[in-house]
Amino acid sequence: MTSGSRPRFVGRERECVFHPPERMVAESSVLNWVNTFDLEDPVATLEELADGVVLHRILREIAPAHFPDGALKDNCGSNAILRTTNIKKLLRALEGYYRDVLLQDLHSGYVDPEQVAQADATEVSKLVELVLGCAVQCDDKQRYIQRLMKDLDKQSQADIMVLSRLLAPRATRMAASPYAVVP
């Protein structure tokens, strides 16, 4: 999908998905960022992310070795159990990536899998925040940052930068082990 064919939600009302006000990020900006990735179909609502499948596809692009194909159940529909199971698997994989690759500990319990599976906008956006953290900290981060700067409007860029700054207290640098192998 080319950047010209990606849907933009700039004209949509700017429904904020984070509360309190100092954490407000527009849903449209989150969707605009998600749609910068090469997806089968554009994502129009946060609810479409509530089963974890689209976010897993994004993570597969970012770090395919850490997010294997077939790890999540496709076509969960509205089945809350399957959706919750997917989100739990996705969160475990994210925790592993943060720990093993980014050398950061995620504060467990930050994202509520049951609420994500029920398409709670705040919880889905928290999960997107963790995926964004992978994109802007991975080995190929320059590619994803350039994409963000090239493909998003100024307001979406600002909102996504706020979202990326929110991640700092969620993931803390791990102490260096005396046995760590330094590349």
Image (cartoon, rainbow, N blue to C red):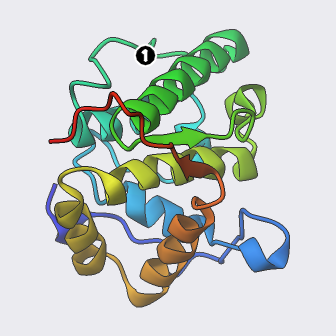
* Quadrant housing the N terminus: bottom left
Q: Is 97 placed above or below 151 here?
A: above
* Quadrant housing the C terminus: top left
Q: How many marks?
A: 1
Task: Give the residue drawn at x 61%, y 11%.
Answer: 82
- Percent across and percent down for residue 147 are 22, 69
The residue under label 1 is which amino acid type? Answer: Asp
Task: Give the residue drawn at x 42%, y 80%.
Answer: 157
Residue 45 shows in the view:
no
- Percent across and percent down for residue 4 are 19, 72
Residue at the spot of label 1: 74
Residue 160 shows in the view:
yes
Please tell me how crowded label 1 is: few (under 14), some (14-19), or many (20+) other residues with Cα within 10 Å. Answer: some
Check disc 1 and report its element: helix, strand or loop: loop
Between 178 and 64, the residue placed more toward the observer is: 178
- Percent across and percent down for residue 133 are 44, 54
- Percent across and percent down for residue 28 are 54, 68
Name which quarter of the figure residue 180 lies in. top left
Q: Is residue 45 left or right of residue 32?
A: right
